[in-house]
Image (cartoon, rainbow, N blue to C red):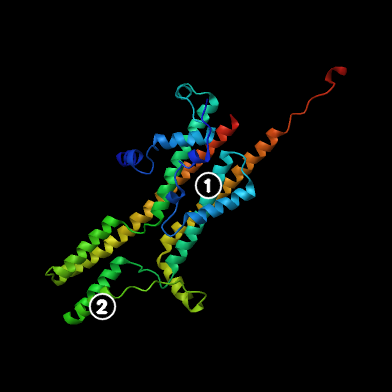
Amino acid sequence: MPKKVTPKTLTKLPKPSRFLLADENWEDYEYRLQCLVEDEKPANVLEYRQLELIARCDIDIDRQYRMISQHLNPLGEAESKGAEIIAEWHRQALMHPDAWERQLDEEASRPRDPVELPDGDERLTPLIAKRYAKQQYLMEIHQRELGAADRRRRQAIAMLFEMQDRRRRAAVPDAEIVGAGDG
Amino acid sequence: MAERSQNARKHGAQAEPPKSLVLVHLKYILGFTPEAGDLMYPTPKLSAAMHLAACEARLDQAHAHYVEVQAIHRHADLDRLMDEVEDFLYHGRTNFGEVQEAVSRILKIEKVSTLVSNREKKLANRYLSEAWSKRGRALQAYIET
C-alpha cells in the first residue's frame, strides 16, 4: 500500500530560507504564498508547487529592485574598496603619527551610524546619476536579472493557468453521439 | 576550459542533486512513495515523474545558488590579496616606485574582484534559466503522459 503524502512529509522539501537572503524573511514569503493559494486555490501538489515558484519569483524581483536602489544610494557603501584603501593610505601619509593613532582609537570606539536611504530629496539626483554612470555594468546585470525574474514569473503563471485549464477540461465528460446508426 | 566545466558539473552549482532530494520531489509529485521495483521498470507516467523530480531538485539547487551569489559583490580571495598589499603599504619600508606599484596593483585587483563577482552572477543566472526551462519541459511532458 503506497504511503500517502501528508503535510509532515511535504516539509522535507528544501526550506524556503534557502532561497532568501539575510535581509529577507520567510514570513513574508509565506504570506505571499498564502495569498496566492487563497487566490488560485491549487487542486493538487503540482499547482501548489507552481505557486511556490511564483512566490519565489516575486521575491527575486523585489530583491533586484532593492539592490538597484542600494547601489544607487549616494549615502551607501563605498564604490571601490581599492580606492578607499589608497585614499586612507594617503591620508595617513599626510597626518602626524599621533593624530593618526588618535583617529584610529576614535574610529574603533565609535560605532558606525546606519546608512538610511534618502527619501524624495531631489538634490540627490545628480549624485544618483553619477553613481549610475559609474556602476553601469553592475546596473546592467541587475536589470537583466530583473527582466529574467519577471519572465520566469510570467512563464510560471502561464503554466499554472494551462494546468488549471487542463484539469477543468478533464472534468467535463466527452460528448456522446446519439442515434448515429438511425440513418 | 573543458576541464573547468566538468569540475563545475561535479562539484558546483550544476552538480547532480542529492538522490534523497530527488526522491522527496518524486514523492511530492506522485502523492505516494513508489516501490523500489517500480523504479526499476517504470511505466511511462512514472518515468516522466522521475524526470520531473530530478529537474525540480536541480531547479532548487540552481535557485539556491543564484540567491547566494546575489549578495556577493566582490571576490573574497582577491579582497584578501588586496588587504595584503595594503599591509605592505603600511608596514613595509617602501620607496616611491614600490608605492606606485602597490597602488596600481590594488586598483587592478579591485577591477578583477568586481569582474569576477559579476561573472559569477551572470553564470548563476544562466544556470537558473537552464534549470527553469528543463523543468518546464519536464512538467509539460509529465502532464501530457
* x, y percent for residue A66: 47, 62
Q: Are marks 1 and 2 in contact (CB under 8 Å)?
A: no
Q: Could you say whether the residue bearing mark 1 is in a helix, strand or loop?
A: helix
Q: Quadrant of the C terminus of chain B?
A: top right
* x, y percent for residue A51: 56, 46
Which residue is under mark 2? A106
Image height check: is B77 above or below A43? Answer: below
Amino acid type assigned to the residue bearing label 2 in the image: Glu
Residue found at the far left of this picture? B93
Image height check: is A30 above or below B3? Answer: below
Image height check: is A126 above or below A81? Answer: below
Do marks 1 and 2 share a subunit? Answer: yes
Q: Which corner quadrant of the image does residue A98 belong to?
A: bottom left
* x, y percent for residue A137: 41, 60
Amino acid type assigned to the residue bearing label 1 in the image: Leu
Q: Spatial distance from mark 1 to mark 2, Cα to Cα? A: 49 Å
Image height check: is B37 above or below A173? Answer: above
Marker disc for residue A61 = none
Which residue is under mark 1? A53
| Eye-nearest disc, 1 or 2 | 2
Asked whether residue A132 appears in the rendered view, the answer is no
Q: Nearer the viewer, residue A55 or A149?
A: A55
Circle 1 marks a residue in which chain? Answer: A
Asked whether residue B27 appears in the rendered view, the answer is yes
Q: Residue at x 14, y 68 (%)?
A: B91
